Amino acid sequence: MKMLRDFELACARIGLVAIVIIILIGGLGRAIGHPVIWSLEIAMVIFAWISMLAIDYAFQLRRHIGIDALTNLFPPKMQRACIWFNEILILSFLLCGVWYGFNFTWATHNQMLPVTELSLAWLNSAVPTGCLLMVFSSLTFLLNGCCIEFQQHDDQEEICS
């Protein structure tokens, strides 16, 4: 799982650098009178993909926002039940994202982006792919008993409720 996490982070970083370079080239091209008209479309596709990779990376580390003011008042067994319940809800939502995202991608795969004439599937497939990655992350979390280990400021920390 760590290799996947590192790979996703590397791809997201490379994609972010690529977006900056592409947008810079597009802006400079417009400034000198030779616009690079494909720059925004390519940047949009890359942004969709790095967004999903970054979301899964944060999901694996459990770095998404959570409001636990109410559940902290519960006894530990009830808190654990809430974690399991929430994770099953998240998994259900992600499975819907995979299903509907794939269907939408398939329905639009013959459409083209106007400038680059790339298939719209390159853009739309980021959502079901990202949801599928998060399904694996969620299943791993569930199979580990809703426990996760992660690095925080060079200290190993374990979260197990």
Image: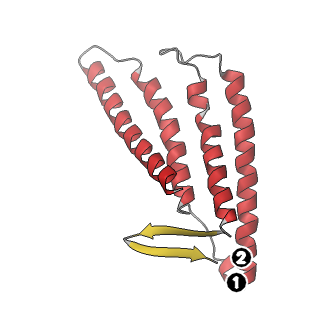
What residue appears at the point 71 percent right and 62 percent down from the top-left corner? 87
Question: Who is closer to the viewer here, 154 or 112?
Answer: 154
What residue appears at the point 54 percent right and 56 percent down from the top-left corner? 1
Q: Position of residue 144 (x, y in %)?
A: 65, 67
Q: Position of residue 135 (x, y in %)?
A: 67, 50
What residue appears at the point 56 percent right and 58 percent down from the top-left corner? 60
Q: Position of residue 39 (x, y in %)?
A: 39, 23
- Using the image, tell me which numbered label, if any, was put on residue 80: 2
- Residue 18: name its quadrant: top left
* Secondary structure found at label 1: helix
Question: Who is closer to the viewer here, 114 or 155?
Answer: 155
Density class for disc 2 (Cα within 10 Å; few <14, some 14-19, many ≥20) is some
Q: How does the figure colour the protein chain or chains?
A: secondary structure
Q: How many marks?
A: 2
Q: Residue furthest bottom?
A: 75
Q: Is residue 158 left or right of residue 89?
A: left
Q: Is residue 74 visible?
A: no
Taking 66 as reference, is 18 above or below it? Answer: above
The amino acid beneath tag 2 is Arg
